[in-house]
Image: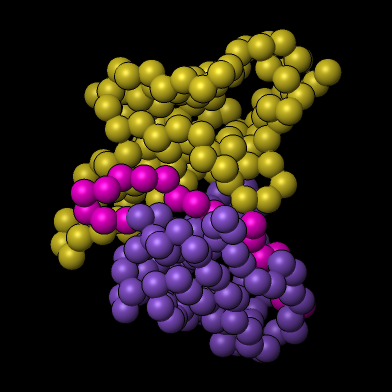
Amino acid sequence: EDKVVQSPLSLVVHEGDTVTLNCSYEVTNFRSLLWYKQEKKAPTFLFMLTSSGIEKKSGRLSSILDKKELFSILNITATQTGDSAVYLCAVEAYVLSGGGADGLTFGKGTHLIIQP
Amino acid sequence: NAGVTQTPKFQVLKTGQSMTLQCAQDMNHNSMYWYRQDPGMGLRLIYYSASEGTTDKGEVPNGYNVSRLNKREFSLRLESAAPSQTSVYFCASKPGTVSLVGPLHFGNGTRLTVT
């Protein structure tokens, strides 16, 4: 059974701090790892990682994947109150028979709170 | 561009009642998914449809049925609602072929309460 574990489950920091969110996984036939940000409604896509060691960056957010050690980190620098959200990590596996992906396996999320 | 549209946004049911949650996407995606999200449990896959005409069970399919009506629409039906089905339900879609990797696009969710 595919498994995704995120840590910490919750985190409270002050505005301007840098945070690192962790995601470890066990999955058969790994295809990709994705990070989402969820505020009040639907999760919104942040990054998709398929190769080890290649950093993806968008503004103050960055992420990297280690396929040997089976984990990913999401970094947020110079945090702002608007970064407060639940950050979800998900892993996609190949379905070898019949083709097509069978959906993502999600971790429980990290609830990040940025205090002014 | 609407993306993934879910209806209704909120619903309250009594135990034993039935209802259908509707989902439509206008991105010409092949694959569609239904997830439920419960506090402390993350998002769990109920059913998915890799292409029009096919559906498969996910992690938590019991108590649900689905229909992939056409390429755009994927509905989730609760035949006899139970309090354990109180949850937020998300529909999602992606291009979804063996060779094409891409992120899921989510609808805004349906908050369902079963009393």
Image position, residue B15 (x, y; %): 70, 84
A63 magenta-colored: no
Identified at 55% across, 70% down, the residue is B23
**In this view, which residue lies farthest toward the front?**
B1
What is chain A's hue in the picture? yellow
Image position, residue A28 (x, y; %): 24, 45
- Quarter of the image for the N terminus of chain B: give it: bottom right
Query: Taking A48 as reference, is B17 above or below it?
Result: below
Residue B41 is left or right of residue B60, and the answer is right
Residue B35 is left or right of residue B51, and the answer is right
Q: Nearer the viewer, residue B26 or A115?
A: B26
- Name the colour scheme: by chain
Q: Nearer the viewer, residue A15 or A59?
A: A59
Residue B31 is left or right of residue A18, and the answer is left
Q: Main secondary structure of the magenta part?
A: loop
Q: Nearer the viewer, residue B52 or A37?
A: B52
Residue A72 is left or right of residue A43, and the answer is left
What is chain B's hue in the picture? purple
Residue numbers of the magenta segment = B96-115
Q: In the rendered image, which quarter is residue B3 located in?
A: bottom right
Identified at 74% across, 74% down, the residue is B11
Image position, residue B62 (x, y; %): 47, 76
